[in-house]
Image: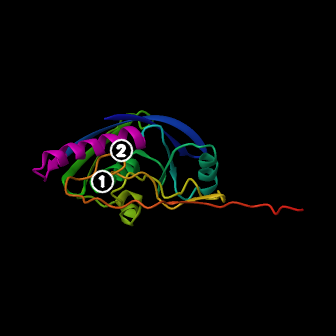
Amino acid sequence: MTWKAGIWFENRLQLNSYQIELMIITNTSDPDDQINCMDRINHFIYEEMNDTIYINQNDLDQIALLSAAGIKITTLPESPIDQVIGWIVFLKLNSILENRMVITDIKIQSDLGDNIRYLHSADESFGSIESPGWWNDPSPVHSAVNPNAGKRRIVKLNPGTSWKKLDMSWSSDAEEPHPANTVVFAQFNKDDE
């Protein structure tokens, strides 16, 4: 699998091309769930990771600037180097598969990393990435930052896209009600008569 993304590293934006190989074990005998697993992997890599900017989640000023410009960002707990991106993708893909399939190993390489391949598996220590983050959430979310933060007029209560909205929920999932999730604040002017 290959995708293109940028990194904000050492105070500059750099464009990069990534390639991963996945080793997967199938734990479900349900063919619909097997298809959904592959659909989720493809969606996450080709729709969420493609054309994103990887950035350290502590670089709040640059995150605010990129978000204000409408640029898709993916926040990371450390600098956006290949090993960290490999760990994050490994953990996130396993989260979104919800044990119906398990990624046992991932190999990642990039153009900026001189195409050196890094191998990651569940047997290694992930350092600060072991703490909870969006990479442990089974939804398609890929940032710890709300892109609508700071916008005062409209508050979205729904955190974002769900697998159900993308028609990639599991065959055993029950229907859930979807109440209205948007609150609009308005200012009404008094009529002076």
Residue 17, relative to residue 63: is it above or below? above
Give yes or no for residue 30 being in the magenta stretch: yes
| Precedes in sequence: disc 1 or disc 2 | 2
Looking at the rendered structure, the kind of residue marked 2 is: Phe
Position of the N terminus, as image quadrant, is top left
Asked if the residue under mark 2 is in contact with the one under mark 1, i.e. CB atoms within 8 Å, the reply is yes
Numbered label attached to residue 44 = 2
Q: Distance between the residues labelled 1 and 2?
A: 9 Å
Residue 110, relative to residue 168: is it above or below? above
- Residue 26 percent coordinates (x, y): 14, 49
Q: Name the residue under label 1.
A: 96
Q: Give the range drawn in magenta.
A: 24-49
User: For the view shown, which residue lies furthest in the bottom direction?
Assistant: 131
Colouring method of the image: rainbow
Looking at the rendered structure, the kind of residue marked 1 is: Ile
Per the image, label 1 sits on a secondary structure element best described as: helix
Q: Which of 56 and 37 is in front in this view?
A: 37
User: For the view shown, which residue lies furthest in the front direction?
Assistant: 193
Q: Which of 95 and 128 is in front in this view?
A: 95
- Image check: 132 left or right of 144? left
